[in-house]
Amino acid sequence: MPSLPELRELETILHQSGHHADISVLCHVVTRHKRFPVYKIALGNPDPSLPAIGFFGGIHGLERIGTQVLLAFLRGTLSRLRWDVSLQHMLEHIRIVFIPLINPGGMWLGTRANPNGVDLMRNSPVEAREKVPLLLGGHRVSNLLPWYRGPAGQEMEAENLVLAETVRQELMGRPFSLAVDCHSGFGLRDRVWFPLAHTADPIPHLAEVIALEELFEQTHPSHRYLFEPQSLQYRTHGDIWDYLYLEALQQPQHCFLPLTLEMGSWLWVKKNPRQLFSRLGMFNPVAEHRLHRVLRRHTSWLDFLMRATCGYQSWQVSGPRRLRMQEQAVRRWFNP
């Protein structure tokens, strides 16, 4: 691949962003004599007393659709800022951060892992408390095999280090913050996963998950998303969002909730079985009309999350109701 279309598109969007975006390069990734930047784009008010949301994609190089969804949303958001007074007003009360392409080296190489052969979603120092699937759950055997975690005792990969630092600076320590990481490749339905991946134990913020799901169902009653903990499907070592969520729990007065959008690529394969013969086809919609449909559907979800973050005080629960919702979530997902 002589160039990286997603990176070209991102740089075009940034060139046209005018004064609305705060743009920085977090690091550079080098592979096969090519050097790729990892961009961070920030919008809105940096005041740490305000809520914030982060949108992340491209952690797995094969899952290009995650980056494409974020680019469509970023382009639309920046375009609306030129005329949408309500959006301009909202950005006075929220911080929004994008890292749409975290693993440009892996995307250019056409691999799940980064150029060092490390799966960035298995690379944190978090160890699973229960049995994980062979290889899939993360291993240290060889970087020639998928789901490689990296050598034991070594610092996380550069891409994860800048991701973690961005989350600490922009999201943690605020009264409320969300992170949305866009992936594809599992199941026939689009799923919204919440922590934890290293254990089946329930998290302290189940009430927020239930409240957010109810809010989404009220505003988008025909949606097709399935909310569930990732551990309900499988458990892994080294999940980067587990690592950051556990760190954020050290500040219990704040709520940091990382979500994973897992787009159900098996449905795309079911509709077009020829995609099975392509590595990219296993994780991305190939037909142009299907690609546009995916971009439209998930852009609505991301816009909802942005607005829900800004208005979190109107739907976040507390007191006895929060306790009841926490117990309801435990019965639903952990004691069926």
Image (spheres, rainbow, N blue to C red):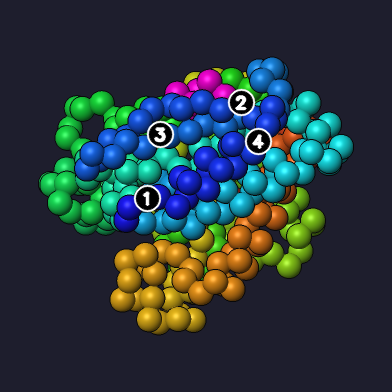
- How many angstroms separate mark 3 from mark 4 (CA)? 18 Å
Disc 2/disc 3 C-alpha distance (Å)? 16 Å
The magenta span reads 164-170
* Labels 1, 2: front one: 1
Give the numbered dot on residue 17.
4
> Which amino acid, by three-letter code, is at mark 3?
Pro
Residue of label 2 = 22
Residue 199 appearing in the image: no
Q: Which residue is mark 3?
A: 37
Residue at 63% x, 57% y is 298
Give SS at disc 3.
strand
Identify the mark nearer the N-term, 1 or 2. Answer: 1
What residue sits right under mark 1 in the picture? 3
Could you tell me the amino acid type at mark 1? Ser
In front here: 8 or 177? 8
Q: Residues within 10 Å of mark 1 (few under 14, many from 20)?
A: few
